[in-house]
Image (tube, rainbow, N blue to C red):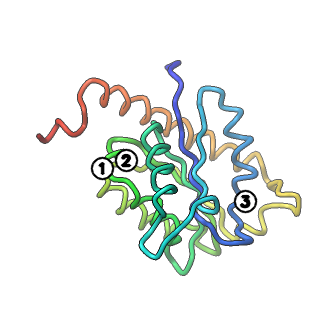
Amino acid sequence: MTTRLTIALIYGSGREGRFADTVAGWLEPELASFSQYDIVRIDAAELAFTPGGLDEASAALVESRISQADAFLIVTPEYNHAYPAALKAIIDSSFRPWHAKPVAFVCYGGVSGGLRAVEQLRLVFAELHAVTIRETVSLAHAWTQFDPAGNPFRPGILNGQLAVLMSRLAWWAHALKAARIATRYDEVAA
């Protein structure tokens, strides 16, 4: 399949001093090596939030990027056995643009490596008619897996996991894109 895909890379944490910058600092150059993708970024730290979610301008920006994406790769920490509120606000800012698109995760945290957050996100994305990818890059005790410059101590292992995840994400993205072109998803149950 040679059709280019647009993948939205979503930074799920907006906290100051977040570890997402280290994880994404490794991830973004690796994604650039997969030349068949156009990457658009949605970064919680660059958005404005209100008590009810995203402000109007941020919500419009997020919806535009979600709409143009063929697939999603979410970088999420696990905070208190769950995913961050900023990520929930990003997700909840749109409904239909998520439909019939695949979602993959690079997660990090303590002993669970962020997997508890991912399992909760799988339920959320099912409600949004999105397909979550089984393969996940999970970083247990993530802060011990990178040197002070942000380079992974075992890049071969992480890059191998990422290659499998991206192969699966691309397969689903191509399959679902072809299906969306053949029949609009909203018309299936109309």
Q: Position of residue 52 (x, y in %)?
A: 42, 72
Q: How many tags in the picture?
A: 3
Measuring 58% from the left and 72% from the top, which residue is drawn there?
112
Query: Which three-letter amino acid code belongs to the residue tagged 2?
Result: Trp
Lower sequence index among marks 1 and 3 = 3
User: Which residue is under mark 1?
Assistant: 129
| Mark 1–mark 3 CB contact (< 8 Å) | no
Residue 5: image tag = none
Residue 45 appearing in the image = yes
The quarter holding residue 144 reads bottom right
User: Which residue is under mark 2?
Assistant: 98
Lower sequence index among marks 1 and 2 = 2
| Mark 1–mark 2 CB contact (< 8 Å) | yes
Position above or below: 71 against 123:
above
Q: Residue furthest right?
A: 148
On-image quarter of the C terminus: top left
127 or 65: nearer the eye?
65
Q: CA distance from mark 3 to mark 2?
A: 25 Å
User: Which residue is under mark 3?
Assistant: 21
